[in-house]
Image (tube, grey):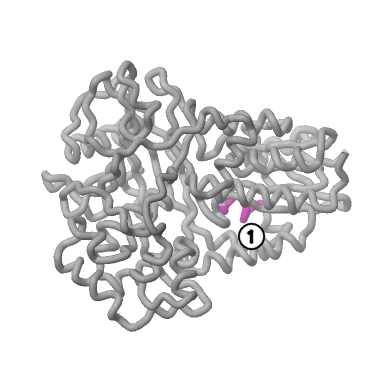
């Protein structure tokens, strides 16, 4: 009987388990080992005032096929829904304004696209960018923030690019790699675009297609996790950390549980033919330190950011701003001059039709936490919720007392795709492939979004099943 262990029970690990079952057949023994008490990783759906509400990832990119295809494949297509037409806003220079459409993660296609968000001086810098010497990237990655500031000045980065990237990486442009975070832009420059505005314009859709950009599921994204676990028919072991990974004569040995439990070998050792690691970079580095030291060393170069989500339910009839949400740059302040703790608000009752039912509570969430800025998270849950509620009142005028609040923290939840990330990932995957019977997946590799994680997990499962006996 073929046996495979999947370490990590998030979307990557459970997608891998599901694909392993499909590839290996009914007689394969698949075990998912998860250190926390629940499955799902950064996909977590809770009950908030009687409604299913996501407090981790709340949506996926619908223009990439992987998540859309998987949802249909596992029988959840009837729950698929897309955002309403409400427009996102950004707090820029102390004023909330509509998020401009003509940008690629804030990189403008023209000066006209960012009028109203930037000062006239900054708009002039955008207009002049096409006249600067051509952008030359070379073969390697470059610091995204440094490049944008050199070409456009600071205001575009601080007011527009950083708030958008903050929702993806919990970090701003400074220190992130262009090729790792905006590969389409880099490809356009490699293909001959001489300026960043030209590159951005070349990869923008020629006109609105009407196709939705994002999707989610009524009932929450946790339903995907539940269905994948069921269909994988894997043995699920919750609350069991993987302590070490060793090569054996016939495969791999996982040492499980805390070190104090090592005296019970029948509970703390799992011998398998193959292993898929679907864990954050620090855990992968630790597990691979002895088994594949070259991969462990590369994983050590991936830094992480922590964040928190403050979910709030307000009484029925509470009025929200006429927007899907509000993005906030790190340098923005409240009208009173007070520094803001929140980096974004999502007005879920405006953004999603299934959360906008008139007879239900009014739901929204605030996000806190930026890479390198830890002070905002070093308070207890009650104080963090109070700070976010204060920011909500200062920026939107909504001072109503919520009927329920839930704080969810994601310590080290978001990997930073810094300069050289692609090279690090290539070293990891090359070293792991040479080890045999071992694969890695997760948000630390080829993208932090749900579709990217599904794609990487599917590839990991294929690499493990190749050459293994099937039914």
Where in the figure is residue 395, as x and y percent of width and height?
19, 40
| Residue that appears at 23% across and 55% down | 331
Question: Does residue 15 appear anywhere in the picture?
Answer: yes
Rate crowding at label 1 as few (under 14), some (14 to 19) or many (20 or more) other CA atoms within 10 Å.
many
Q: Could you tell whether 350 is left or right of 444 in the image?
A: left
Figure check: 174 above or below 242: below
Which residue, given by chain and number where applicable, does mark 1 sit on?
A: 296
Q: Residue furthest top?
A: 359
| Residue that appears at 81% across and 41% down | 24
Where in the figure is residue 159, as x and y percent of width and height?
25, 57
Which of 181 and 196 lies nearest the eye of the viewer? 196
Where in the figure is residue 44, as x and y percent of width and height?
50, 33
Where in the figure is residue 170, as x and y percent of width and height?
39, 51
Asked which quadrant contains residue 392, the reply is: top left
Magenta stretch bounds: 281-287
Of helix, strand and loop, which mostly describes the magenta segment?
Answer: helix
| Residue that appears at 56% across and 47% down | 65
In the rendered view of the protein, which quadrant contains the C terminus?
top right
Question: Does residue 380 appear anywhere in the picture?
Answer: no
Figure check: 94 above or below 34: below
| Residue 198 covered by magenta stretch | no
Q: Could you tell whether 317 is left or right of 105 in the image?
A: left
Which of 237 and 466 lies nearest the eye of the viewer? 466
Q: Could you tell whether 340 is left or right of 289 in the image?
A: left
Which of 57 and 135 lies nearest the eye of the viewer? 135
Secondary structure under badge 1? helix
Asked which quadrant contains residue 152, the reply is: bottom left
In the rendered view of the protein, which quadrant contains the N terminus?
top right
């Amino acid at each position: 009987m073929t046996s495979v262990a999947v370490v990590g029970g998030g979307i990557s690990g459970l997608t891998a388990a599901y694909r392993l079952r499909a590839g290996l057949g009914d007689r394969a023994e698949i075990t998912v080992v998860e250190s926390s008490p629940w499955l799902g990783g950064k996909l977590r759906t809770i009950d908030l005032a009687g409604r299913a509400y996501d407090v981790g990832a709340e949506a996926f990119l619908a223009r990439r096929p992987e998540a859309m295809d998987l949802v249909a494949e596992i029988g959840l297509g009837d729950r698929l829904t897309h955002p309403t037409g409400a427009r996102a806003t950004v707090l820029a220079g102390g004023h909330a304004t509509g998020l401009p459409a003509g940008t690629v993660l804030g990189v403008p296609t023209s000066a006209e696209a960012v009028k109203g968000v930037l000062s006239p001086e900054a708009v002039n810098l955008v207009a002049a960018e096409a006249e600067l010497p051509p952008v030359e990237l070379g073969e390697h990655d470059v610091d995204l923030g440094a490049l944008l500031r050199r070409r456009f000045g600071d205001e575009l980065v601080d007011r527009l690019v950083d708030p958008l990237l903050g929702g993806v990486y919990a970090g701003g442009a400074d220190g992130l790699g262009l090729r790792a975070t905006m590969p389409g832009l880099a490809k356009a420059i490699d293909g001959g675009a001489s300026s960043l505005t030209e590159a951005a314009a070349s990869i923008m859709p020629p006109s609105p297609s009407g196709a939705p950009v994002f999707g989610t599921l009524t009932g929450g994204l946790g339903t995907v996790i539940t269905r994948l676990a069921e269909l994988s028919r894997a043995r699920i072991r919750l609350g069991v950390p993987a302590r070490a990974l060793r090569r054996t004569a016939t495969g791999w040995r996982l040492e499980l549980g805390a070190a104090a439990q090592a005296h019970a070998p029948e509970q703390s050792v799992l011998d398998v033919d193959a292993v898929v690691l679907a864990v954050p970079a620090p855990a992968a580095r630790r597990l691979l330190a002895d088994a594949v030291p070259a991969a462990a060393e590369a994983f050590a170069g991936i830094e992480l950011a922590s964040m928190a989500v403050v979910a709030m339910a307000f009484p029925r009839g509470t009025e929200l701003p006429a927007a899907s949400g509000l993005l906030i740059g790190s340098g923005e302040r409240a009208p009173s001059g007070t520094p803001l703790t929140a980096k974004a608000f999502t007005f879920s009752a405006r953004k999603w039709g299934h959360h906008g039912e008139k007879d239900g509570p009014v739901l929204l969430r605030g996000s806190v936490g930026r890479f390198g800025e830890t002070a905002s998270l070093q308070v207890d849950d009650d104080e963090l919720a109070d700070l976010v509620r204060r920011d909500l009142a200062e920026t939107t005028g909504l001072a109503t007392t919520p009927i329920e609040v839930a704080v969810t923290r994601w310590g080290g939840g978001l990997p930073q795709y810094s300069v050289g990330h692609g090279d690090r990932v290539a070293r990891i995957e090359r070293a792991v492939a040479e080890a045999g019977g071992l694969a890695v997946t997760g948000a630390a590799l080829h993208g932090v979004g749900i579709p990217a994680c599904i794609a990487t997990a599917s590839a990991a499962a294929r690499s493990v099943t190749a050459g293994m006996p099937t039914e």
